[in-house]
Amino acid sequence: MTDLQTPYYLIDLAKLRVNMERIAHLRALSGAKCLLALKCFATWGAFDFMRPFMDGTTSSSLYELRLGHEEFGGETHAYSVAWADNEIDEALGYADKIIFNSLGQLDRFGTKAKARGIKMGLRLNPRFSTSGFDLADPARPFSRLGEWDLARLESALDRISGVMIHYNCENGDFDLFDAQLSRIEAEFGSFLEKLDWVSLGGGIHFTGEGYPLEKLAARLKAFQQKFGVQLFLEPGEASITKSASLEVSVLDIIHNGKDVAIVDSSIEAHMLDLLIYRETAKLPQDGAHAYQVAGKTCLAGDIFGEGRFAAPLQVGDRISIADAAGYTMVKKNWFNGVAMPAIAIKDEDGTVRETRRFTYDDYKASLS
C-alpha cells in the first residue's frame, strides 16, 4: 500500500519481467523478432525496462510511430489503415519499414518511400481470424483491412519486400494457431516465398500460463526456413498482461437491493475497452462480502463489475483492479471531467514512484 492519491495506474515491473523474459526466450529459440504494439500499450515510462527484451515497435498512426521512434528505438514499423497526404513525409522520417493497407495507398505513396530507401510492405488479409467479436474481427464481411486477392498481391512484388498478416485475437490455443498458419501457407505459400519478411501481427497469447512456448518457437522457425523469410510478431497484450492495475478508493456505499461501492474512477473513462466489449473488470473475489463496484460518472452503466471482499467495505478503502494496461491506458479519456488516473511504476525492489499526475490544466488543454 502506498500513500499516492487514487486513482492511479500501477505498472509492476516484477510482473512485467515475467512477460519480457518469455518474449526473450521465444526470440532466442525461434529467430523471430518481437515488436511492441503501441496500439495496445504506449506508456513510455516503461520502455527503458522493456527495450532489452524486444526488437522495437509497431504502430497504427503517425503519433504512435513517432513515439516508438523517439522513446523506444530499435526497429520501427509504420502501419496505418490510411496515410494522409499531410503526414506521409513525416511518417517516412521515422520508419524503418512502412506497411500499406491497400494497393491504392502503395500506388500513392510508394514512390516516396522508395526514394527514402525505406522497405515497404502490404497488409495481407487471409479472410479468417480468431476474433470472437465482430467489432474486432479483421476478417468480417467487407473488411477494409488489407488485400487478399493473390493476383493483386503479386502485382506488387516489384515494390514490396514483406507483408503483415494480423488475424489472431487473444488466441491462447497453439493448435488453432498452427492450423491457421498451415492454411496461410497453403493458400499464399507461392507468394510468401518471394518475400524477405512476414509479420504475423499480434494477438497470440504466448505469455499466458501453460502456453507451449517451445512448440510455438519450433513452428515459427520452421515457417522461416520453409519460406526463407524473417518473421516478426507484434505482441501487445502478451507483452503486458497481468503487469498493471488500476488503484481506486471507495467514495460511498449505497444499498439498493445490493451493496454498491462507488469509487473515484470510471470504467467509461479509465477502462473503456471493457465497456465496449461488455466485459467485467478483474476485481477481488476472495471474500464473503459481495459488492457491485461502480464508477462516479453520470453514465448509468458505469459499472466495473461484482467483487467479493474479506471484510465489509468502508469509505476510504482501496480496491485494486487487475489487468489495467492493455487497451486501457491508451483509451483513457476525460468523460465527465473525472480526474485522469496518475501513472506510477513499482520497481522490482518494491519502491513505488509516480511518473505522471494529470491536472485540471491537462483537462482544459485537451479541449479548446
Image (cartoon, rainbow, N blue to C red):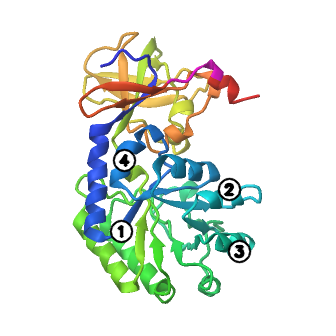
* SS type, badge 1: loop
Q: Position of residue 240 (x, y in %)?
A: 37, 46
Q: Residue furthest top?
A: 315
Is residue 57 highlighted in magenta? no
Q: Is residue 192 above or below residue 93?
A: below
Magenta: main secondary structure: loop
- Please give left or right for residue 75 compared with residue 49 in the image: right
**Label 1, residues with CA under 10 Å away: few <14, some 14-19, many ≥20:** many
Mark identifier at residue 90: 2
At horizontal 60% and vertical 86% (from top left) the residue drawn is: 154
Q: Residue furthest bottom?
A: 190
Label 3 belongs to which residue? 111
Provide the residue span drawn in magenta.
357-361
Labels 4 and 1 touching (C-beta < 8 A): no
Mark identifier at residue 50: 4
Q: Is residue 100 above or below residue 193?
A: above
Q: Amino acid at mark 2?
A: Glu
Nearer mark to the viewer, of 3 and 1 = 3
Q: Position of residue 107 (x, y in %)?
A: 72, 75
Given residues 247 and 42, the one toward you in this image is: 42
Q: Earlier in the sequence, mark 4 or mark 2?
A: 4
* SS type, badge 2: helix
Q: Amino acid at mark 3?
A: Thr
Q: Earlier in the sequence, mark 4 or mark 1?
A: 1
Which image quadrant for residue 204?
bottom left
Q: CA distance from mark 3 to mark 2?
A: 15 Å
Q: Amino acid at mark 4?
A: Met
